[in-house]
């Protein structure tokens, strides 16, 4: 699977945003304050833009930038034969050459660049109102079935199921993971004490207030007093 295949299977922009926020919220509950979280979401990344991200801590990462113009996705597999560091320190031909002007600032974002070279092996974009995801015209030169790393990098964005995330989290965190609680989060329902405790009994929704705000996850619904009837 290459980035071209990923483009055929990604959901629309609202659904992708929910997937990114769901993974970030689930990990915030499983590992509050943990330095080894794999997924995150910053609803206040920069004016008018939100950032979903994955970082495996070993050099592989992606960034999903949500803006009024649409969405730009950058993936970097450090072991890919298409990595700039596998050759002359230039981006593989076609990967970002046809990115629309509205997303050029994302390509040139300093936090995605090292020593003047964008860290990117796979790239997709979708403008607001567009009916599909777009990629560059790329000729692959070997690299097996996943030459640009897209299959590995974007697997959870494509799969989008609570079951897939829960299976991964059980292995990654070496802990039981309540599937119903993950389903609750993937449905973007406000957190409840019972649901949070099912994932992590040492955490309460109140302790997650800052994380909820940072991620832009729906706030806990307050319990309103019942009106008195005369």
Image (cartoon, helix red, strand yellow):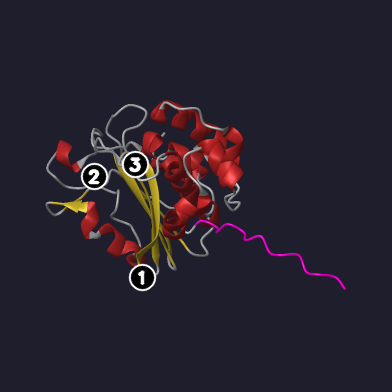
Residue assigned mark 3: 34
For the N terminus, which image quadrant?
top left
Horizontally, residue 113 falls left or right of residue 31, namely left
Q: Is residue 1 above or below residue 132?
A: above
Point out the frontmost of discs 3 and 1. Answer: 3
For marks 3 and 1 on the same chain, the one whose residue lies earlier in the sequence = 3
Q: Is residue 153 above or below residue 215?
A: above
Q: Which mark is residue 105?
A: none
Residue assigned mark 1: 47
Provide residue 218's location: percent of width, then percent of height.
55, 58
> For this rendering, which residue is in front, 24 or 105?
24
Q: Determine the residue positioned at 24% across, 38% down.
A: 59
Magenta stretch contains residue 222: yes
Horizontally, residue 189 falls left or right of residue 93, namely right
- Work out how far the residue at label 1 is from the one at label 2, CA to CA, in angstroms: 30 Å
Horizontally, residue 41 falls left or right of residue 131, namely left
Q: Which is the main secondary structure of the residues drawn in magenta?
A: loop
> Magenta span covers which residues?
217-230
Provide residue 54's location: percent of width, then percent of height.
36, 44
View extreme (bottom): residue: 230
Secondary structure found at label 1: loop
Residue assigned mark 2: 92
For marks 1 and 2 on the same chain, the one whose residue lies earlier in the sequence = 1
Provide residue 202's location: percent of width, then percent of height.
47, 39
Q: Are marks 3 and 2 in contact (CB under 8 Å)?
A: no
Secondary structure found at label 3: loop
Q: Determine the residue positioned at 13% across, 45% down.
A: 89
Secondary structure found at label 2: loop
View extreme (right): residue: 230
Q: Are marks 3 and 1 in contact (CB under 8 Å)?
A: no
């Amino acid at each position: 699977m290459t980035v071209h295949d990923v483009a055929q299977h990604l959901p629309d922009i609202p659904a992708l945003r929910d997937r990114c926020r769901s993974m970030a919220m689930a990990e915030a509950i499983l590992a509050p304050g943990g330095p080894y979280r794999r997924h995150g979401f910053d609803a206040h990344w920069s004016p008018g833009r939100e950032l979903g991200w994955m970082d495996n801590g070993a050099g592989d990462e992606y960034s999903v930038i949500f803006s009024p113009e649409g969405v730009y996705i950058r993936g970097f597999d450090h072991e890919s034969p298409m990595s700039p560091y596998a050759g002359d320190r230039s981006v593989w031909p076609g990967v970002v050459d046809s990115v629309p002007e509205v997303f050029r600032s994302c390509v040139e974002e300093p936090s995605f660049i090292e020593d003047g070279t964008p860290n990117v092996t796979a790239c997709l974009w979708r403008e607001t109102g567009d009916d599909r995801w777009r990629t560059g015209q790329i000729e692959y030169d070997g690299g097996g079935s996943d030459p640009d790393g897209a299959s590995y990098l974007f697997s959870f964005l494509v799969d989008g199921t609570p079951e897939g995330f829960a299976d991964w989290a059980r292995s990654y965190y070496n802990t039981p993971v309540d599937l119903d609680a993950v389903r609750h989060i993937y449905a973007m329902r406000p957190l409840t004490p019972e649901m949070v405790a099912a994932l992590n009994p040492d955490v309460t929704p109140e302790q997650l207030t800052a994380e909820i705000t940072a991620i832009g996850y729906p706030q806990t619904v307050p319990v309103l007093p019942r009106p008195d009837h005369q």
